[in-house]
Image: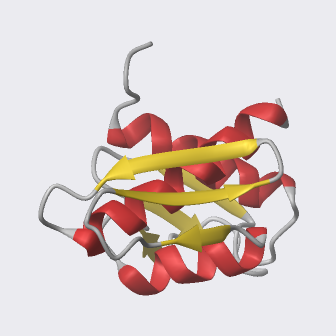
C-alpha cells in the first residue's frame, strides 16, 4: 500500500468535516499545501487556510471534532490516532509534533474515505 500524499490526506480530512456539516467547512478547495475554506455564510470568498499537517491548532481541532483518540508513547516509537475502526500509526522520526499531526490527519482521512 502506498502512502497518501499530503494533498490526498488533506482532501479526505476536509471531506470528512464537510460531510459532518461542520459550519466552518461551508466549502473548501484543496491547494498543494493547504485547504482553502469558505467559512459560515460567507460563500464565494476564501476566508481561511487550514492545514492540520503543519498547524498544531488545526490538528487539535480536527481531533476534537472527530473525537479521535491520540496516544503519544514515551518511547519515541509510533504515535497512534484513531476512532473505532479508523486507526493510524505514524513513526516519530525525531519530531513527535509532526508525527502527532500526521496521525490525526491520517485517521480523519480514513473516516472521510468511509463516508464516500
* Image coords of residue 32 (percent x, y): 29, 44
Residue at figure coordinates x 67%, y 56% from the top left:
82
Q: How many marks?
A: 0
Residue at figure coordinates x 34%, y 33% from the top left:
5
Quadrant containing the C terminus in the rendered view: top right
Q: Is residue 51 visible?
A: no
Q: Residue furthest top?
A: 1
* Image coords of residue 84 (percent x, y): 83, 51
Q: Is residue 28 visible?
A: yes
Q: Look at the picture and state if 80 lies above or below 70.
A: above
Horizontal arrangement in the rendering, residue 116 relative to residue 100 (left or right): right
Quadrant containing the N terminus in the rendered view: top left
* Image coords of residue 38 (percent x, y): 62, 70
Horizontal arrangement in the rendering, residue 50 relative to residue 68 (left or right): left
In front of the other: 39 or 4? 4
Q: Residue furthest bottom?
A: 57
Residue at figure coordinates x 48%, y 78% from the top left:
58
Q: Residue furthest left?
A: 94
Q: Look at the picture and state if 54 lies above or below 58.
A: above
Amino acid at each position: 500500500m502506498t502512502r497518501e500524499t499530503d494533498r490526498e490526506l488533506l482532501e479526505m480530512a476536509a471531506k470528512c468535516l464537510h460531510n459532518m456539516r461542520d459550519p466552518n467547512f461551508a466549502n473548501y478547495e484543496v491547494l498543494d499545501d493547504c485547504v482553502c475554506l469558505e467559512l459560515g455564510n460567507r460563500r464565494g470568498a476564501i476566508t481561511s487556510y487550514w492545514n492540520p499537517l503543519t498547524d498544531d491548532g488545526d490538528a487539535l481541532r480536527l481531533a476534537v471534532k472527530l473525537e479521535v483518540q491520540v496516544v503519544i508513547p514515551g518511547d519515541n516509537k509510533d504515535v497512534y490516532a484513531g476512532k473505532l475502526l479508523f486507526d493510524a500509526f505514524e513513526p516519530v522520526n525525531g519530531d513527535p509534533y509532526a508525527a502527532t499531526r500526521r496521525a490525526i490527519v491520517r485517521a480523519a482521512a480514513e473516516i472521510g474515505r468511509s463516508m464516500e
